[in-house]
Image (tube, rainbow, N blue to C red):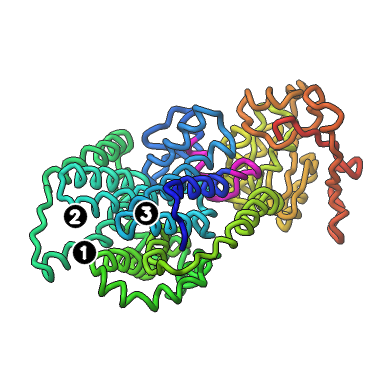
Amino acid sequence: MNIRSDLSWLLVLLISLAVFLPGLGAYPLLDPDEGRNAQVALEVVRDGHWLPPTLNGKTRYQKPPLYYWLVASTFLLIGPGEFAARLPSALAALIGVWVTLLLGTRLWGREKGCLAALLQATSLIYVSYAHIVIFDMVLTSFILASLLFLWKALEEGKKRDWALASLFVALAFLTKGPVGMVIPLMTFLPVLLYKSLVDKERISIPWPLVILVFLLIAAPTFVLAELREPGYCYHFFWEENVLRYLTPRFHRGAPFYYYLPVILLGLLPWTFLLPSALRKLQELWRLYPHRTLLLASWILLPTIFFTLSKSKMPHYILPTFPAWALLIAGTWKENQIFPFKLIPPVLIAYLLVFMVAMPIYSKRKSAAFAVSLMVKNDSTPLYTYKAEKRYSLAFYSGKKIRNFKSVEELKNALDSVSKAYVLTKREKLASILALSPPYSLKVLGTSPKLVLVEIENPFLHSSTPPKNPTTAGELRGQGNFWVRCCIDCQPLNPPWLTIFISTFIDRMGNEQKLPGRRNPSHLLRFPPFF
């Protein structure tokens, strides 16, 4: 590898910016994770539900509040939207790369530290989660910082470093709960035991200071949440952590080898460097036993821990990927030439994915299209029928969403309102159509998987026409944040921004004709911020 310039860190920074920031606001929020987490953060800002946070007005027990607070802060600074929602993950990824560079420099020197940071910044799993509204990138950065200061404390023995390590463990705990403490402990404990039992070194850990810092940072949040919502700690610690780990009640089970393909795919495009690194592991142990043990514990123990869990998801082992990057960099020989020629095509590929492919893919997955077709911004309720976990609907519409699992429940709700919007899956549309008569139905729009239907109750139908906003700004001001498109937003649109989009369902092939279609296309006018 030839990275001779002292500005090599700048190269890593620029590459990181090039892969983390583009595309953050290029496509709607994807359900369920992005829509759910963004909606919780929005309720923090809009309703003042800082602690405990809420989802659709109900207490959110599943995760601690720190990540929601970070997303809510970006909403306050630059306004609610896709870019603001994803920005904390991107910034956390950038910080994580920087911390890996610092830790790699301490372990292997500046050149290999830069190499480790570069490998991490361009690995598929790391770039992917830098673009997702989810906790794990922030968690990974806090765990990285805690391990950096734990290693620094082990080398230098300063109380300040032990305190800072405890601080970042507490922040990781506030991000995703006990796992934020478990991963640093299971990573670092083998190193402490090795130095104590094998090297016979006496390690002085200021336990009162470490415990005090952790409790001062982490405890007040849970104490206050429990005081405001009795039972919060029980739900969070027992049901959402212990039972999630021990039981398959959350339906996230997977075979024992689940994380092997996650590792191989997640390290792309650098997976081909892995066999060489593993072959040199014995030599690395002979030269640097403590450092090798740190990385081995960091990789193996969390992976085994989550393999034994009854709930498995790819992002659970995201905090281990910096260790893979550090391991590959540590086994890299000074006379080896790193394949830098791969960097440009990798960057281009990521840009194409997040600027082109994801916007196309999101049209099939996102429920945001439904809000773009809601032409009347009034008090009309928005329901879902057997289309649960469409949390982005609440985010884009500013409405509380009720999901119904049976036609009878839906009919009971429709009997009490004059009009409602109902979002359902295409295969469930027949059940909705069966409501007519007596209800009046009109299909407002479709996507490959979803259909938005307007249902009017003739017995309660109001003769007063609802307000029809004419600008996207008006929509946004009344709670519809970052609406992707709206019908007849004429005052905002110069002629060149007027686009005809075919939405006639018959173009899809053999589908049945749907009621409410007066012409084969709707005129959708895209606001300038699109």
- Between marks 2 and 3, how big is the CA–CA gap? 20 Å
Q: Quadrant of residue 183?
A: bottom left
User: Circle 3 sits on which residue?
Assistant: 110
- Out of 50 and 59, give the one closest to the viewer: 50
Q: Quadrant of residue 201?
A: bottom left
Tell me the crowding category of disc 1: few under 14, some 14 to 19, or many 20 or more residues within 10 angstroms, Cα based: many
Task: Please tell me whether mark 1 or mark 2 is closer to you in this view.
Answer: 2
Crowd tier of the residue under label 3, counting other residues whose Cα lies within 10 Å: few below 14, some 14–19, many 20 or above: many
The answer to which of marks 1 and 3 sits earlier in the sequence is 3
In terms of sequence position, does the residue under pointer 2 or pointer 3 come before the other? 3
Instruction: Tell me the CA gap for discs 1 and 2.
Output: 9 Å
Percent position (x, y) of residue 56? 51, 38
Q: Position of residue 45 (x, y in %)?
A: 48, 29
Q: Amino acid at mark 1?
A: Val
**How many callouts does the rendering have?**
3
SS for callout 1? helix
Q: Which mark is residue 154?
A: 2
Q: Give the residue number, with chain letter if any, for mark 1.
A: 191
Label 2, secondary structure: give it.
helix
Give the x, y percent position of residue 23: 62, 45
Other-residue count near label 2 (Cα within 10 Å), few / some / many at <14 / 14–19 / ≥20: some
Magenta span includes 164: no
The answer to whether any part of residue 150 appears in the image is yes
**Residue at the image position 70 percent from the left and 31 percent from the top:** 529
